[in-house]
Image (cartoon, helix red, strand yellow):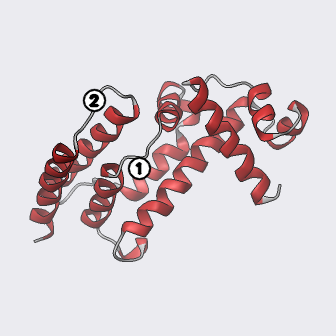
Amino acid sequence: MRQSSRTDILDAALRVVDAVGGADITYESVAREAGLTKAGLMYHFPSKDALMIGVIEHVIDRWQAELCEVLAVPFEESTLAQRVQAFVSFAGQGGVTQGEFVVFTEAVRRPQLSAPWLAYLRDWFGFGEGTDTTPLLLAWLAANGLWIAEATSILTVTPAQRAAVLGTLTGLIEEVSA
């Protein structure tokens, strides 16, 4: 499949998830949004799980590209502290949609979909043994809480609150980096 076709289909699937507010999307709804027939969509994604895995990988690819833009060094040369700081900055900017949140909760709800998500987490945020990573873990967990709260609209964060939270998290990360 041409990469642009795959990207167009996955973008269409995300638009559907955003519109319906859930990951219970249908071939018909995604095909209609992508301008394809159901058979055309099934040619590219032979099962609904294959479509959902594709959507999860698509979101992860976008996130990783955005995170890499924030990193001050190439990913391969980055430290855990730099990756957590990039995530805090990324999550602190907002922009994560409810649909993206739903896609990832679907991966938690259905473990057969979780492999791409778990690989992303391991690669970027392997809080391993040996060093005390508690401040980094705390900053990462808080940043995740921020984007989840905003993606689900359970909390409105004012610009002043956002700046204070992000400043505090950055301070935790800088303590580790010092």
Among the two numbered marks 1 and 2 on one chain, the one whose residue lies closer to the N terminus: 1
Q: Are marks 1 and 2 in contact (CB under 8 Å)?
A: no
Q: Position of residue 16 (x, y in %)?
A: 65, 32
Q: Residue at x 47, y 52 (%)?
A: 120
Alpha carbon of mark 1 to alpha carbon of mark 2: how far? 25 Å
The relative height of residue 92 versus residue 2 in the rendered view (above or below) is: above
Residue 89 located left or right of residue 27:
left
Q: Amino acid at mark 1?
A: Leu
The relative height of residue 82 versus residue 104 in the rendered view (above or below) is: below
Residue most extreme to the front = 159
Q: Quadrant of the N terminus?
A: bottom right
Tell me the quarter of the picture where residue 36 sits. top right
Q: Can residue 132 be seen in this snapshot?
A: no
Residue 38 located left or right of residue 75:
right
Tell me the quarter of the picture where residue 44 sits. top right
Q: Residue at x 27, y 33 (%)?
A: 156
Q: Position of residue 43 (x, y in %)?
A: 87, 40
Q: Amino acid at mark 2?
A: Leu
Q: Which mark is residue 155?
A: 2
Q: Position of residue 169 (x, y in %)?
A: 17, 53
Q: Secondary structure at mark 1?
A: helix
Q: Position of residue 27 (x, y in %)?
A: 77, 28
Q: Residue at x 42, y 71 (%)?
A: 75
Tell me the quarter of the picture where residue 33 sits. top right
Q: Which mark is residue 121?
A: 1
**Count of number-bearing discs:** 2
The relative height of residue 86 versus residue 38 in the rendered view (above or below) is: below
